[in-house]
Amino acid sequence: MKTSIALAALLLGACSAAEADPADGDAANGGYAEQVIEVPDFADFLLVDGATVWATNKGRIEQWSTMGKVTSVAVPRPCGTMAMAAESLWVGNCDGGELYRVNPRTGEVLEKIPAGIGPSGEQNVVAGAGSVWAPNQAKGTISRIDPETNTIIASIPVAAGTTYLAYGFDALWAASGEGGTMQRIDPQTNTVTDTIELGKTPGFLVAGEGMVWIQEQGDGTLARIDPETRTVVGRTKVGDNLKWGDIDTGDGKVFLRTTDDQTFVVIDAASAEVIARVGRAEGSGALRYTPEGIWTSAHDVHSLTWWTAASN
C-alpha cells in the first residue's frame, strides 16, 4: 500500500539536548525528538496497540506504525476514543449509532451493536470491569456492553450531555461539558454514586497516577479529583483555554494535548506543575502515552507524530 512518511531525520540525527541550540530541535521541544508521519484526511482519536497506534479517520479507522500504514477498516463515521477489550477493538460510529467490534489482528468487523452513539463527535468508548462502556447521548444514558454476548446489559441514567468517559479506581467516571459535572458510577450497582461540580466546559479526562484528571476547557485549567473523597483537590492553569485536545497519564506524569500554544504539555503528577511544553501549536488532535514514547495526532495538518524523550 502507498504511504507517505516525513521522518524528520534532522531531529532524529541531531545532537543531544544538552548540545542543541535552545531555539530549535530537541531543546525547543522540551527534550523530545519528533518523527512526523503524514496521514491524509482527518486522523484524530488514538488507541495504542503494541508498537502501533490506531487512529480514527474520515470513513475509516487506520493502524499505523512509525514505518507507515499497516491496515484500514471501514467505519462510516468513527467519532471518539476507542477501547481495547476481549481481544477486540471497540469504536463508536456516529453515522448510525452503532458500537463496532473489530478484530485488531485481521481488521474484520465482528459485530455492530446498536448503542445510540452520537451525534456529537466526541463520544468516549472505554473498557473496565469486564465490560465496554459507551454514551447514549440522545437518551442521556451510558450503555454497558457485555463482550461475551455483544449485548447491552445496563443503561445508566446520567447528566444530560455526558459523552466523556474514563475508567479507573474501580469506577466509571463520566463528564458532561453541557452540565459542567463529572459523575462517578459504581460498576457493582450500575448507579451514579457522586456528582462533582466542575468549571467551565469539562471535557476529556483520565484516571491514573493517583487522581482523576479532567480538562476544564473554558477555564484553561486541569482539575484533579481525589477518587477516594470524590472532591476537587486542585487545579493547574495551562493556558487561556483547553478547547478540544486530549489527555493521558504514565511514568508519574500527565500528558495534555492542547490546541493552542504547543502540541502538548507535560505535568508532574505529584506536584501538579507544568514541567514541559512540547512542540508547536498544530490545532486540535489526540494523544496517547506509551513507556517508549508519545503518539499525537494533528488532523488540521494531516499528521501523526511519534515523540521520544532524549533519555530514550
Image: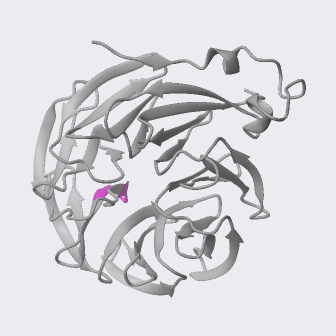
Q: How many marks?
A: 0
Q: Position of residue 161 (x, y in %)?
A: 31, 77
144 is within the stretch colored magenta: no
Main SS class of the magenta portion in the image = strand
**What residue span does the magenta drawing correspond to?**
127-132
Quadrant, the N terminus: top left
Q: Nearer the viewer, residue 265 or 144?
A: 265
Q: Quadrant of residue 138?
A: bottom left
Relative to 150, residue 193 above or below: below
Q: Is residue 175 left or right of residue 156?
A: right
Residue at x 78%, y 29% (from the top left corner): 311
Q: Is residue 177 left or right of residue 27?
A: left
131 is within the stretch colored magenta: yes
Q: Position of residue 61 (x, y in %)?
A: 27, 37
Residue at x 52%, y 70% (from the top left corner): 217
Q: Quadrant of residue 53?
A: top left
Residue at x 62%, y 67% (from the top left corner): 211
Q: Position of residue 262 (x, y in %)?
A: 64, 49
Q: Is residue 202 left or right of residue 9?
A: left
